[in-house]
Image: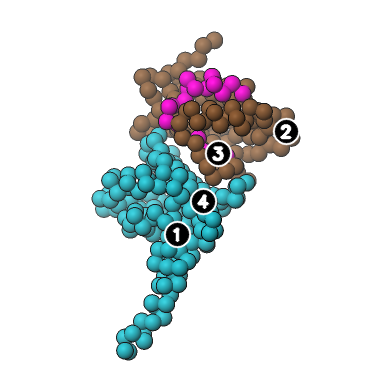
Amino acid sequence: MPVDPTNIDEVFDQLKKLFNDGKYDDMRQFLDPNITWKMLHHADSFTGVDKVIQWLKDNKAALNPQFGPDPSRKTTNSNPDGKLVEGPAKWQASKGSLHIEDIEYHFTFTNQGGSWLLKNAFGVVVG
Amino acid sequence: LLVLAAATPFIWRWLKGSEKGGLGMPGFDQKDLQQTFLSLRDLFNAGDYEGMRALLHPNLTWKKLHSADSITGADGVIQWLKDSKRIPNPQFNPDLNQESTSHLRDGGVQISGPAEWLAEKAKPKDVESIEYNFTFTTDRDDRWLLISAFGRVMP
């Protein structure tokens, strides 16, 4: 069933699925060209969809990290120029690893021509 | 001579501060993370955006509070602050009692917590509750630099 890009929940779920499946190139259609992506365990960020996807392909393809947001605690709030989707999640830096971390994610989406695009991805490890 | 003698300790402390932090702020030590954080707060609240430069990493990413946009690079951030924030002179007042610190794998440190945000200093009633998350890293001289500034308005 195709994803409705005007439905922010469907876009969020599809991004999660593509990320967890390691299909980083397919995420491009849901990413803003000027996306900023903060690395979870490092101080650095990446800006620009090309850099973000290349970094994912170069550094995450083998590890295939898994992002598991808690759907019951996901919240969506409006910003003047977008929406902030956030909540707690489980993070597995490497698929199959026994080490699972609790994180909080804050994803900011913008609406362009009716479609929702991820513009800012920020996350922190908690606990 | 009496005035010079009385002022000597203050001048000495000022010079000492200059050596440590490069800002000329008495007693400020940029190798101390908390002092760096508080100096950034004070400089921001004073509207001294150029003065913040020594505490910002060249590749700083600054997420705008009320927008999806971010600004990348210390030069871009400072110019945006000068162009957009000089007159409203926003005020950032973190609750230091609820401040928390966490360490990253690359040696970076995140300071986060709740804060009060005043978009315009002249409108003290329009205060907002926010959560901030600042990531700091060190330069080759072990001085702390802000490399990521993220904030969100509490719903």
Mark 4, chain letter? B
Q: Earlier in the sequence, mark 1 or mark 4?
A: 1
Q: Which residue is mark 2?
A: A97
Give chain A's shade.
Answer: brown
Answer with left or right where residue B147 lies relative to residue A19: left
The answer for how far apart the CA atoms under marks 4 and 3 are is: 13 Å
Asked whether the residues under marks 4 and 3 belong to the same chain, the reply is no
Which image quadrant is residue B77 in? top left
Mark 2, chain letter? A
Could you tell me the amino acid type at mark 2?
Answer: Ser
Of tags 3 and 1, the one toward the viewer is 3
Could you tell me the amino acid type at mark 3?
Answer: Met
Q: Earlier in the sequence, mark 2 or mark 3?
A: 3
The answer for how far apart the CA atoms under marks 2 and 1 are is: 39 Å
x then y, percent, for residue A30: 47, 22
Which mark, residue A39?
A: 3
As drawn, A109 above or below B145 = above
As drawn, A16 above or below B79 = above
As drawn, A27 above or below B57 = above
Q: Secondary structure at mark 2?
A: loop
x then y, percent, for residue A123: 54, 38
Please rate how many residues cluster around mark 4, counting C-alpha atoms within 10 Å: few if below 14, some from 14 to 19, many from 20.
many
In the image, the segment drawn in magenta is: A22-40
As drawn, B46 above or below A19 = below
Mark 3, chain letter? A
Which mark, residue B136?
A: 4
In front here: A85 or B133? B133
